[in-house]
Amino acid sequence: MEWTPEAIKAEMDYRQEALREDARRVREYYRNGGQPRSWWHRMTHRHEPEVPAGPQAA
């Protein structure tokens, strides 16, 4: 796959939106009285965005 400027911009926008969503979720968690989690819990309970499996998804 060739990375065109449009494809790079789309990828950057997608990742930026995922980071914003994660930050929103964390702020909401702490606002509702959530407690900080240990580094181990954060590493083993990640909220990865749902990404299609590339050409296999088509």
Image (cartoon, helix red, strand yellow):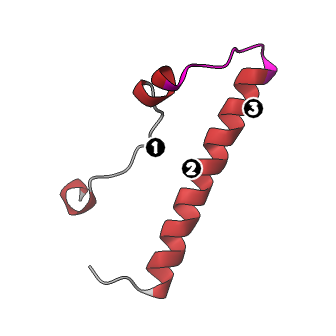
Placement of 23 over or under 3, stated as above or below? above
Between the residue at mark 1 and the residue at mark 2, the CA separation in whole angstroms equals: 7 Å
Q: Quadrant of the C terminus?
A: bottom left
Does dot 1 land on a helix, a strand or a loop?
Answer: loop
**Of the residues shown, which amino acid type is indicated by label 3?**
Arg
Residue 9 in the image: state x and y as whole percent. 54, 76
Q: Is residue 47 magenta?
A: no
Q: Are marks 3 and 2 in contact (CB under 8 Å)?
A: no
Q: Residue at x 74, y 27 (%)?
A: 28
Task: Quickly name the residue at label 1.
Answer: 49
- Which residues lie in the magenta part? 31-39
**Badge 3: how crowded within 10 Å, few (<14), some, or many (20+)?**
few
- Sequence-wise, the earlier of marks 3 and 2 is 2
Mark 1 or mark 3: name the one nearer the start of the chain: 3
Residue 24 lies left or right of residue 52; in this view the side is right
The type of residue carrying mark 2 is Ala
Label placed on residue 27: 3
Q: Residue under circle 2? A: 18
Q: Amino acid at mark 1?
A: Pro
